[in-house]
């Protein structure tokens, strides 16, 4: 056969290989997005678990006593207990996020530059999320306190849990979804750029 002319079977196999090559990057991206969501979920669970443990298990007095070892007065530590819990939970969740995204999501080498870019991106995401919550609540009027849309009450490990989904969650959920999407692209294009 002349050079450059393919038999029907060869054409079919070449076309199939080209289609597979085009789908492979899309599947890789889909798996990367799934890993991003899983690592982010693990970081969120870390934040919630640390907050829960500090508030419900350790408590204000024990927290203040532990922080006093750092030279902070117990009264000041007790007065700013929630802020301390939030800061500690954020730092531990950030560590989970940094190691998870660098190792699992983006398979990137960890470096000081990546750490600083990720910290800056996380602060930008936080600022954007707060601004979105404010905008959705104040400018659009969504999120006013209202009757629960859904309510679930149960007990897990003898810890009573109560959850009400009401209008106050709307700005939180909308901002969380939007910032998660933007964070993915920011992490991919800037934090873990290749």
Image (spheres, grey):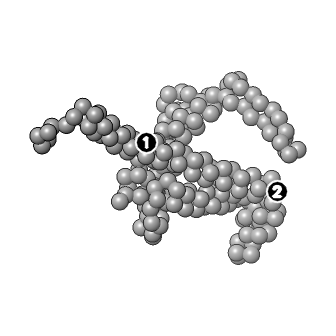
Provide the residue designation for mark 1.
Answer: 27
Residue at image point 66% right, 50% down:
45
**Residue sitting farthest toward the right:** 158
Which percent across, then down, holds residue 184? 45, 47
Position of residue 147 in the picture relative to residue 29 (left or right) = right
Dot 2 and dot 1 residues touching (CB under 8 Å): no
User: Can residue 88 be seen at all in this image of the molecule?
Assistant: yes
Q: Residues within 10 Å of mark 1 (few under 14, many from 20)?
A: few
In x, y percent, where is residue 61?
82, 62
The CA distance from mark 2 to mark 1 is 43 Å
The residue under the point 78% across, 36% down is 162
Camera-side mark, 2 or 1:
1
- Work out whether 146 lies above or below 92: above
Q: Nearer the viewer, residue 188 or 22?
A: 22
Indicate which disc, 2 or 1, sits on the residue closer to the N terminus: 1
**Nearest the eye: 161 or 185:** 185
The quadrant of the image that shows the C terminus is: bottom left
Using residue 138 as the reference point, say whether residue 75 is left or right of it.
Answer: right
The residue to which callout 2 is attached is 57
SS category of the residue bearing label 2: helix
Residue 134 visible, this angle = no
Which residue sits furthest front?
A: 1
Q: Residue furthest left?
A: 2
């Amino acid at each position: 056969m002349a050079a450059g002319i393919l038999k029907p079977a060869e054409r079919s196999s070449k076309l199939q290989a080209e289609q597979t090559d085009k789908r492979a990057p899309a599947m890789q991206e889909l798996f990367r997005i799934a890993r991003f969501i899983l690592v982010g979920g693990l970081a969120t669970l870390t934040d919630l678990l640390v907050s829960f443990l500090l508030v419900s298990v350790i408590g204000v007095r024990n927290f203040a006593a532990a922080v006093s070892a750092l030279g902070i007065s117990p009264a000041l530590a007790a007065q700013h207990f929630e802020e301390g819990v939030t800061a500690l939970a954020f730092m531990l969740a950030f560590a989970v996020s940094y190691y998870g995204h660098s190792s699992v999501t983006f398979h990137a080498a960890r470096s000081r530059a990546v750490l600083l870019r990720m910290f800056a991106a996380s602060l930008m995401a936080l600022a954007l999320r707060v601004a979105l919550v404010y905008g959705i609540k104040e400018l659009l009027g969504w999120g006013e306190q209202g009757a629960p849309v859904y309510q679930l009450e149960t007990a897990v490990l003898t810890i009573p849990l109560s959850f009400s989904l009401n209008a106050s969650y709307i700005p939180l959920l909308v901002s969380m979804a939007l910032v998660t999407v933007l964070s993915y692209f920011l992490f991919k294009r800037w934090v873990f750029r290749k």
